[in-house]
Amino acid sequence: MRVSYENKLGSIIFLMVSCLLIVFPLVYEDRNLLIIFTQIFIFAIFAMSYDILLGFTGIISFGHAMFFGIGAYSMSIFMKRFEPEMLYVFLALIVGVFLSAIVSYVVGLLTLRLKTHYYAMLTLALANLFYVGAEKWRSLTEGADGFTFRIPDFLRERVNFYLITLVLMVLVYFALKLFIQSPFGKVLVAIKENEQRTESLGFNILYYKIIASIIAGILASIAGALYAISLRFVNTSVFSIDITLDALLMTIIGGVGTIIGAVIGSGVIEFSHYWLTSLVKLHWIFERWIIFFGILYILTVMFFPKGIVGALTALKRKARHEKKHDQSDKMTG
Amino acid sequence: MTSIIETKNLGISFGNHKAVDQVNFAIDEHQFTSIIGPNGAGKTTLFNLLSGQLKATNGDIFFCGKNITKCSTVERTRLGMGRSFQLTNVFPNLTTLENVRLAVQAQKKIYFQMLKSVFSYKDHSEIAKTILKTTLLVNKDDVLAKNLSHGDKRKLELAMLLALDTKLLLLDEPTAGMSVEDVPAIYEVIERIKEEKTKTILLIEHKMDMIMNLSDRIMVLFNGKLLADGAPKEIIANETVQSAYLGGLYDEYTA
Amino acid sequence: MELFFSLLINGLATGMLIFLLAVGLTLIFGLMSVLNFAHGGLFAWGAYGGVWIYSLTESYMIGVAGAIITGVILGFITEKLIIKPVYGDHVQQILITLGYMLVLGELIKVVFGPNQIAVSPPELLRGSIEIGELLIIKYRAFIIITGIFIFLIVNYILKNTKIGLIVRAGVIDKEMIQALGVNINKVFLYVFMTGAALAALSGMLLAPYAGVIHADMGMEYAILAFVVVVIGGMGNVTGSLLAAALVGISGAFMAYYVPELSLATNMLLMVIVLVFRPKGLFTIRG
Amino acid sequence: MMSTLLKLQQVETYIEEFHILQGISFEARKGEVTVLLGRNGAGKTTTLRTIMGLNKASKGQIFFGNEEIQTLQPYEIANKGMGYVPEDQGIFGELTVEENIKVAMKKDDSQSLERLEWILQIFPDLKKFWQKQSGLLSGGQKQMLSIARAYVKNCELLLIDEPSKGLAPIVVEKVMESIQEMKDKTTIILVEQNFMMASRIGDYFYIVDEGRTVYDGKMQELIGNKELREKHLGIA
């Protein structure tokens, strides 16, 4: 049971780091760092939700921003139209989750039968539809200019919000870990590995894909809502392809199909983003930091398709293997 | 005695080409039947019709007396028809045990459970391990399927089929593409399954010695039609079969 | 009636721009089953490259030539560096080309600056011509004529030249064409470069039509081109022309009468085609 | 003894992990029809595909003339003078008969045109349906088109995979006659399950089993020897 052992090790490290992070704001006061960490937690949730699709079910969606945007707008519009109270925060979350679930169900039902490239194309187009929709429906969204809103005082407190997002991320992490170890999760992996075979075992793969995309959509919408709260501002960019690309970059650079990879990817990207933009003073090229990520991403897909986590486990496995090989060589040689 | 699987005038056409044409047969429970015939005779197509990968253009298929012609692959599997594929068809990045466990899970009808770890289904692992023993895959539980040898992959394929615990097994060339040394092991596995006398087996194969030893009955397909059907000895003696194999006018030179 | 024609011409012009983008996509897919998500990036680069040369030389035609050359060069680089390493792996292709799209867009901002650039048509193509009651904007007519001209050339090449014959045969059976002595990889490179050149040309033609160019302009048109490729059928050039005209014209009419739904109609069309006729509306296969 | 045109030495080929060719060796002599016989799944088609470079040999050598070709790309091998008629004929169905032929001709030089003229004499049907969409041809005509297409391209060695498959007996007869006529012009390797057809036009045969050649000899020898046939080809 080596695989599950490695899994447990990852989870234990994750839990330990999370505990450290809980204590962190109490001992070290740095507003900037707090904000960055909050961002990381939010995007970690978003990236993990994407990993369910890409890493576990083998679905390439280019429209994940759809759900992120739905969550963000639900929250923002509730905060703007109603009082900035916790009750409405919850209501907004529920509405966002509900809407995402419906949208992902309908989209899934229509499109998940399609082949990979058609599906990717269609989701890209649908997300663009939401983007344009948000731009056109100005009475509700105020278009690309967007709008600011107030949030409950409790959430205005940076440390509170930091802790909430951290706890949510940890919860999502463990919930997903459980999810992928469940019989249902195993079927998802089977679908990614070999769709036809999964079907011939008697599993109805369309149901599985739809449920997976609903779960991913719901989590993405929660991430979107948190994102809106953290900015206290929303505009159409939450529906843009860049948001989907963020999720792609994070999961792929971190390592697809590992959950923890999404978290690591989120951390790496947010931190380097922060660091690279701080270098703008040195050279203007750092304003275009996304280029570095784009290139890094392409190289990762080409040469390390399993990302940071994948590369690390491969290294470890190789070391172990070489040991074994040496022994067996001696035996046969 | 009711037969477990029966076809009535079963056929499929691709354009003008009748790949399977008016095939009628009925197979009794626990019988071991082999299907032989030259390339392009329609053997795999017939399997695809039986297992639901292809839809028949005409005729009907009955499974345990029930007309299943319109049922999907999934439904047929759930009714009790399992099939192996000519190409190796396993989950490459899962371990051997996980591969089989998925099939056990399907058999136990655990479809949408998402809040319980698979490790809490101890019985599944137990069943899976027993099957790995039957299929001569002991000590390979932890190996990723893609790292198995070709022969072991074919065994894994059979193991997954067994795990589904279906009444009927459709085996499509279990020894295809195998190095000569690997063949006896597969033969042994199939023989073991046969000896348990709990399954009805339909086999497509080319290795004649294997077919002769295992089969209760042989069906010969030629150009989509059922050319002959009977006990192995009858088939060997059958002149039409001989000439079908050697291409048309075999007698021209023997006469 | 006047309005009708004006909308029709407007739609056709947009349709032609989309068609130029779709030609490359559809042939690249048909030949090597590569779906290039970065095609919109080549389109944007064509616009920037062309406009830059246009502003330097003050000659629109040289600008157009510049756009085409930009497309050819970029096409060459893209095929060699991005597409070739991931032949045959759909998942990688999809992931890589989308990432490459991102890089292309950002590179534009690095090279040409992040702000949008205003472009106006050359002297000769400004204003409009009157035909009876009808007022036709010259530049739109120019786009339509260019589009049809290109379609005829592409069609001629495909139908009447050796290389065209090879491309058509390659779309049908890649393996057999190699067994007949054709180096398919080389053919594919040429097709890819041609597709990139046409995408770049499309971008350059769009620039004075839209009035401004910006680094993210590729995505919107690329999505329309995807729609067109799907509706027209993968690998089908005539199908793409018809589909592009359909999408362009219906877009123009919808934008006038029900502006809120204009984009939704195209999407709906694509969804319907994908769900019910995944091989495309205009594909007849024997 | 005529000179060897093609020679395989211990060639092994995997398709994915399927060990299809397990060390096959044989040779084809100039001007002869060499027939590969054997039951299905024996590796005959893979042998032709490996010669053509469509499947890569993992071990062994293939000599065409004096040259080793197992590492070359399919198009390079084709240009060395190899023509390939695959099992499914590989017709470009949406193209006309003319286009199918033209796509294979390197140039319109006099030599190619001569070859074309000659082959059209053998297959007059093709001339008749010159402008017809090839997907609409009958099975036999498609077979003829495939053979003609492979031949026009200056081919020294023609690889034909089961030309009789799926054809009515009378059409088989016709295709066979034409192949017989081509014997004078080009060397042929023929894969065939239909022994009657193979025995009529073959000069030399190899029996392939389990991805190896297990027996070879003059065709005459096989025709006169029932025991041999039953041992290697029969089902008993």
Image: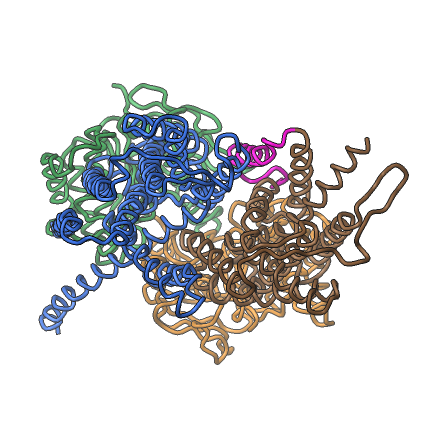
Q: Which chain is green?
A: B
The residue under the point 13% across, 43% down is B134
Q: Is residue C247 left or right of residue D190?
A: right
- Quarter-of-image position of residue B126: top left
Q: Position of residue D64 (x, y in %)?
A: 49, 75
Whether residue D176 is situated above or below residue C12 in the rendered picture: below
Drawing shade for chain A: blue
Q: Which chain is orange?
A: D
| Front residue of A208 and C127 | C127
Q: Position of residue A164 (x, y in %)?
A: 22, 39
Q: Find the residue positioned furthest to the bottom.
A: D66
Q: Is residue A197 left or right of residue C128?
A: left
Display colour scheme: by chain
What are the residue bounds of the magenta stretch? C258-286
Q: Is residue D105 in sight in this rendering?
A: no
Q: Is residue C59 left or right of residue C277?
A: right
Whether residue D153 is situated above or below residue A265 in the rendered picture: below
Drawing shade for chain C: brown
- Quarter-of-image position of residue A216: top left
The residue under the point 23% across, 26% down is B29
